[in-house]
Image (cartoon, rainbow, N blue to C red):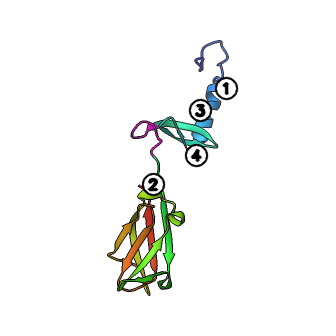
Amino acid sequence: MEASGLAEGQVPAEPTPDIYSQLVEQLSKKADGLLLENGRLWLTAQGVAIGPSVVLPQGQGETPVPQRYVCDFLPDQFTEQEGRYQLAIPQEQHQMGISGAVIELTRQTELGFENVAIQYRRQSNGDILVYAYQPFAGRIVIEGV
């Protein structure tokens, strides 16, 4: 970079085009995405990282996002088992593996969905069995852990 300005008897030097162009370019960029690389996160503009990066916890940025299975069900999907009703969600359906856990179960009402206290069992093969005293329409959320 060269100094510019007025000096007696000299024509002022123009700002270095590269620096000027770079400043204008950086000032005109608007973030339109994110870049994750080696545990660091950057804002991006047109696919190019801009600004400082942020180091993610654990330094790797490879912590998996919990996977979730969300499914609406109907009363006729329950089967009667020894005086109560059972809703079976096979592991092949929810695909959360053998350690999938029910994190939410709601009952559908005229006003929307409301939480329901439930009892469920996870079979050794990963199938989820939900138990209720009456069949109902609702939504289940299973998370892989």
Most common secondary structure along the magenta stretch: loop
Q: Secondary structure at mark 3?
A: helix
How far is the residue under mark 3 from the one under mark 1? 10 Å
Q: Earlier in the sequence, mark 3 or mark 1?
A: 1
Query: Can residue 98 be seen in the rendering of this structure?
Result: yes
Q: Which mark is residue 113?
A: none
Q: Quadrant of residue 144?
A: bottom left
Q: Nearer the viewer, residue 42 or 23?
A: 42
Q: Is residue 112 among the parts visible in the rendering?
A: no
Callout 1 secondary element: helix
Q: Is residue 129 magenta?
A: no
Residue 23, disc = 3
* Residue for point 54% across, 64% down: 92
Tag 4 residue? 30
**Residues shaded magenta:** 54-63
Separation of disc 1 and disc 2 at Cα? Answer: 49 Å
Question: What SS does tag 2 mark?
Answer: loop
Camera-side residue of 59 and 79: 79
